[in-house]
Image: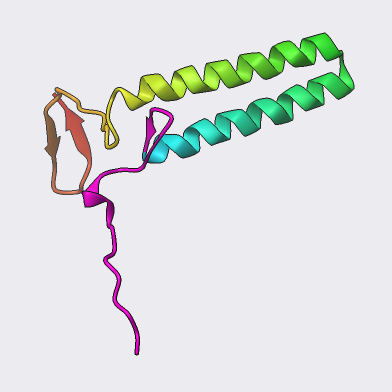
């Protein structure tokens, strides 16, 4: 006989990890991996110290960019204050 267990569904909230929420967790992981790849390439091709600076720069810059984009919200959209008039053929005219 199968047992039934209560399932926790997260109360419809985004996943939070180390201050990053939802899709920004993946952005943070991508910035870490990008920093590691470019830092390793620079270390192997140019210089170890320059590679370390590139690694730190990419990681810190990517995480700061991710944190700044997160302040806009999970579903941030660009909002224009312009008025668009659609003519019969579907072209937009900006007023």
Q: Nearer the viewer, residue 93 or 27?
A: 27
User: Residue 50, image x and y in percent?
Assistant: 78, 10
Q: Nearer the viewer, residue 26 or 15?
A: 15
Seen in the picture, residue 90 relative to 48 is either above or below; the reply is: below
User: Residue 17, image x and y in percent?
Assistant: 42, 35
Q: Residue at x 50, y 22 (%)?
A: 63
User: Which residue ends up furthest to the bottom in the rendered image?
Assistant: 1
Based on the picture, tell me whether residue 4 belongs to the magenta stretch: yes
**Magenta stretch in the rendered image:** 1-21
Image quarter for residue 76? top left
Q: Quadrant of the N terminus?
A: bottom left
62 horizontally vs 57: left or right: left
13 horizontally vs 18: left or right: left
User: Residue 15, image x and y in percent?
Assistant: 35, 43
User: Residue 75, image x and y in percent?
Assistant: 27, 37
Q: Residue at x 40, y 22 (%)?
A: 67
Q: Quadrant of the C terminus?
A: top left
Based on the picture, tell me whether residue 19 belongs to the magenta stretch: yes
Seen in the picture, residue 13 relative to 32 is either above or below; the reply is: below
Q: Nearer the viewer, residue 38 or 13?
A: 13
Image quarter for residue 70? top left
Seen in the picture, residue 5 relative to 30 is either above or below; the reply is: below
Q: Residue at x 48, y 39 (%)?
A: 26
In terms of secondary structure, what is the magenta stretch mainly? loop
Number of labels in the image equals: 0
Q: Residue at x 64, y 30 (%)?
A: 34
Image quarter for residue 68? top left
């Amino acid at each position: 006989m199968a047992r039934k267990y209560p399932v926790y569904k997260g109360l419809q909230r985004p996943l939070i990890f180390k201050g990053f929420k939802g899709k920004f967790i993946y952005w943070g992981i991508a910035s870490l991996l990008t920093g590691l790849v470019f830092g390793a390439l620079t270390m192997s091709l140019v210089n170890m110290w320059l590679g370390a600076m590139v690694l730190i720069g990419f990681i810190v810059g990517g995480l700061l960019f991710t944190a700044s984009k997160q302040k806009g919200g999970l579903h941030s959209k660009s909002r224009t204050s312009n008025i668009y008039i659609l003519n019969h053929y579907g072209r937009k005219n900006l007023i």
